[in-house]
Image: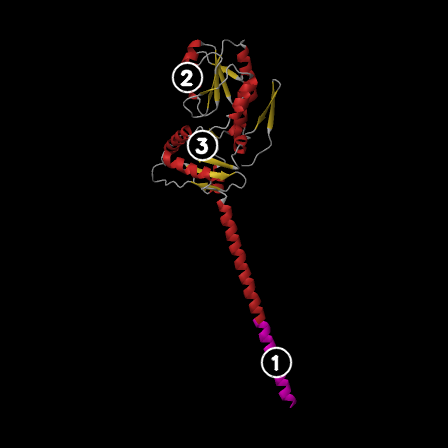
Amino acid sequence: MLRVESIYIFIDNEIIEYDGELAADTLVEFLYDVIEDPVEIIDNERELKGFHNIDEDIKLVGYFKSEKSPHFIEYDDAAEEFHPFIKFFATFDPKIAKKLNMKLNEVDFYEPFMEEPVTIPGKPYTEAELVDYIEEHDRPTLRKLEPHSMYETWEDDIDGEHIVAFAEEDDPDGFEFLEILKEVARENTDNPELSIIWIDPDDFPLLVPYWEKTFGIDLGSPQIGVVDVEDADSVWMEMDDDEDMPTADELEDWIEDVLSGKIDPDDDDDDDDDDDDDDDDDDDDDDDDDDDDDDDDDDDDDDDDDNDDDDDDDDDE
């Protein structure tokens, strides 16, 4: 995936780099997010429901006494460091905090697609402590490739590779496969070596032909594979369109083989090198055959010359 030149946005003494798709609608939507407040306040049940409906992004929520609380100010300052890429919420309402099962000055961290949050230890927090924690945990087990941050996500690889899953959320098979992915991610959320990028082809219609040609796959059905980010070599899990989706256990076994190195896209490079060596050997054999043919031709020419000399001697006699 080729990176394009970045766009920088200057707002309230902050510089925000836009590192996504250069499409007008995507850029405008990103700008609307930029001008929003870094922290969204949850005041009622409707807003709490909206908070719970967000499951594709990293999000944090804190419970504080008021906007003037020094602990909220630290939280708000930390939010500015990640705005608008990570969503920050807060409440000052004890009833809302009770439904979130939160204590005063506490902050909960929600990883994408996870059912339960993690309470950040060590409250009350300074801005630096919050920033450090988020930076340490900003690579989710399962994350969605978003148009507004696609290049940044792609560059955040593990040892030069990505586990990539293609699935259309609105497609029945795609939805089923995505639910299996979520189950595997929840079971392995403590594994720092595992990070799966989910791509919904509907979000990137212009890139679908490129991906299908580059990876040699059909995105009309769900796919999961491991991709080398440098040369785009890849290995994809075999899935029969006519059969059921792989079970969570089967998918987990395949992922374990990837993480252990049993499945490695670089193995294709080794095969190509072997093929090149075979071609070189064939070329050498052809050269040897040509040399032998040349030697035979030279011998035949010498014999012809000797015969001509004998004929001349007979004529002289």
Residue at the far left in the pictured view: 243
Question: Pointers 3 and 1 in contact (CB under 8 A)?
Answer: no
Residue at the far front in the pictured view: 122
In the rendered image, the vertical position of residue 231 relative to residue 188, given as above or below: below
Q: Which residue is mark 1?
A: 306
Which element carries disc 3, helix, strand or loop?
A: loop
Q: CA distance from mark 3 to mark 1?
A: 81 Å
Which element carries disc 1, helix, strand or loop?
A: helix
Q: Is residue 203 left or right of residue 305?
A: left
Q: Residues within 10 Å of mark 3 (few under 14, many from 20)?
A: many
Residue 181 falls in image quadrant = top left
| Magenta stretch secondary structure, dominant | helix
Q: Which residue is mark 3?
A: 200
**Residue 49, disc:** 2
Give the magenta-colored segment's residue range: 296-317
Work out whether residue 234 or residue 262 is closer to the camera in this orientation and state it.
Answer: 262
Percent across and percent down for residue 61 are 47, 17
Instruction: Please state which amino acid type lies under the numbered disc 1.
Output: Asp
Q: Is residue 32 visible?
A: no
Work out whether residue 51 or residue 282 is closer to the camera in this orientation and state it.
Answer: 282
Instruction: Please state which amino acid type lies under the numbered disc 3.
Output: Asp
